[in-house]
Image (cartoon, grey):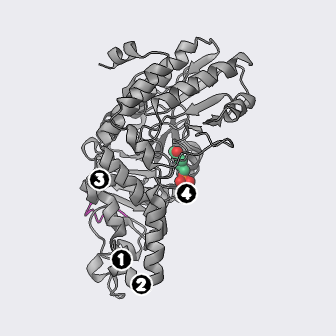
């Protein structure tokens, strides 16, 4: 099926425009604010993997809460159209649908790295024998720091307790069989597998089901950082069965800079009182939450990990964004993403420049929207050239440009236009 589509791609503006005309999700672009260049022309924004664009409704929903705060003040907790005490609950269902989870397994709270720490408080329980954490070698810096500090905090040494799943020499991607081998050799010493998915640098998506099964078979806990996965890849968290996952909402989920993160705790742990956790009043059952003198009695499920009453003004844009996801349907979004990224790949290859090498796997099953493009002998000036040409993407040292067409607001013509400008830029390089 996918192969066939690749065969029909054409390197022409007419083709790109035609695809846009026939795109059932095309009209969703209207729901976002597209940044413009100084001439007032829309930029080619391919940076949704870093900061998703603003849904137009975000402003309305923030203003709604400013009005509630102004007019109702403390009564807003119960009497706002969406009462503040329930605000996180209305986000759970659309969020869960995107990730293939049950609403009770999902909560929006805190920020990503904070959630990662909270999850490790519960799911990293080192013993003298089983004290290691396994991460992928090119993990995002924050995950690296978080994991190391958790290991140290429990009195272990990262030199011994932190192990890496690495690409082989002269390869960029991690192989599943190498992970299998590590688990075979050291599985009884590994307390936790913590994998960033998809990888922020290469765009490689790791198979959640297989990794979870491997880890569980060896008695390890398994967690995923879906910073680059949420709203991008099919995660099917409930069925695939990892113990936990964390993510942020400001990348593919378009919810605003530094917006709140999310947490998934698998249903099997919903009432697991053996897990240690850091606690706060918002994780306590609603009916006795305001009765200040009772012992901590957690809400079953992910909600029980909440600490504080949440920042409503930051949740308002999440509401705006998740409404769009719900309306479009994540299956449809993913379908368009496959076509759009496939088209981008086709066009870049069609440039036929030998200096270009795409790091990201070819197989759509093994990637999300992002392509990581390595340009031999390039330096940052190529990236500056991109920005000057009105293509917003991002640069990773030493020589990688990451581009991610976002299916909700990028068009086939965006992708086509990017390839035209890239072709021009490469001429002067
Ligand atoms: C974006 C990203 C983060 C950022 O963490 P914050 O706590 O939201 O600042 C962490 N980990 C990964 C893998 C990321 O891609």
Dot placed on the residue nearer the N-terminal end, 4 or 3: 4
Q: Residues within 10 Å of mark 4 (few under 14, many from 20)?
A: some
Q: Secondary structure at mark 3?
A: loop
Q: Mark 1 or mark 4, which is nearer the start of the sequence?
A: 1
Q: Earlier in the sequence, mark 4 or mark 2?
A: 2
Q: Residue at x 56, y 34 (%)?
A: 201
- Taking the image as shown, residue 192 lies to the left or right of residue 298, namely right
Is residue 81 depicted above or below 324 in this figure? below
Instruction: Name the residue tied to disc 4.
Output: 258
Q: Which comes before the other along the chain, label 1 or label 3?
A: 1
Q: Position of residue 149 (x, y in %)?
A: 57, 55
Query: Label 1, on which residue?
Result: 80
Cβ of mark 3 under 8 A from ligand 1: no
Q: Which residue is mark 2?
A: 72
Magenta part of the chain:
269-276
Q: Nearer the viewer, mark 1 or mark 3?
A: 1
Q: Which residue is mark 3?
A: 266
C-alpha span from label 1 to label 2: 8 Å
Q: Is mark 4 within 8 Å of ligand 1?
A: yes
């Amino acid at each position: 099926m996918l192969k066939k589509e690749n065969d029909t791609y054409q390197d022409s503006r007419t083709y790109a425009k035609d695809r846009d005309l026939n795109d059932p999700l095309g009209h969703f672009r209207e729901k976002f604010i597209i940044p413009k260049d100084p001439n007032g022309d829309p930029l080619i924004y391919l940076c949704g993997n870093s900061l998703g664009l603003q849904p137009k409704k975000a402003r309305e929903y923030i203003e709604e809460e400013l009005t509630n705060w102004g007019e109702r003040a403390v009564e807003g907790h119960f009497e706002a159209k969406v009462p503040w005490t329930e605000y996180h609950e209305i986000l759970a269902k659309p969020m869960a649908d995107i990730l293939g989870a049950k609403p009770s397994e999902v909560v929006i709270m805190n920020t990503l790295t904070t959630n990662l720490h909270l999850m490790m408080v519960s799911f990293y329980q080192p013993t003298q024998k089983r004290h290691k954490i396994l991460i992928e070698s090119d993990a995002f810096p924050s995950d690296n720091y978080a994991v190391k500090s958790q290991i140290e905090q429990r009195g272990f040494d990262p030199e011994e307790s932190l192990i890496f799943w690495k690409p082989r020499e002269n390869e960029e991607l991690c192989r599943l069989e190498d992970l299998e081998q590590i688990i075979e050799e050291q599985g009884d010493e590994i307390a936790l597998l913590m994998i960033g998915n998809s990888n922020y640098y290469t765009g490689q998506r790791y198979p959640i089901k297989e990794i979870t099964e491997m880890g569980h078979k060896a008695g390890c806990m398994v967690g995923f950082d879906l910073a680059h996965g949420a709203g991008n890849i099919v995660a099917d968290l409930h069925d695939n069965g990892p113990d936990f996952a964390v993510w942020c909402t400001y990348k593919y989920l378009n919810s605003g800079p530094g917006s709140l993160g999310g947490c998934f705790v698998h249903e099997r742990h919903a009432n697991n009182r053996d897990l240690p956790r850091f606690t706060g009043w918002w994780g306590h059952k609603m009916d006795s939450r305001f009765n200040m003198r009772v012992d901590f009695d957690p809400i079953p499920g992910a909600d029980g990990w909440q600490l504080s009453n949440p920042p409503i003004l930051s949740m308002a844009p999440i509401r705006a964004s998740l409404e769009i996801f719900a309306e479009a349907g994540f299956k449809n979004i993913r379908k368009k993403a496959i076509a759009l990224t496939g088209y981008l790949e086709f066009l870049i290859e069609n440039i036929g420049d030998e200096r270009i090498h795409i790091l990201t796997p070819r197989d759509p099953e093994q990637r999300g929207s992002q392509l990581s493009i390595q340009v031999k002998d390039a330096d940052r000036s190529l990236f500056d050239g991109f920005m000057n040409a009105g293509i917003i993407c991002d640069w990773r040292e030493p020589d990688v440009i990451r581009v991610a067409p976002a299916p909700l607001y990028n068009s086939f013509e965006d992708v086509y236009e990017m390839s035209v400008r890239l072709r021009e830029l490469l001429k002067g390089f």
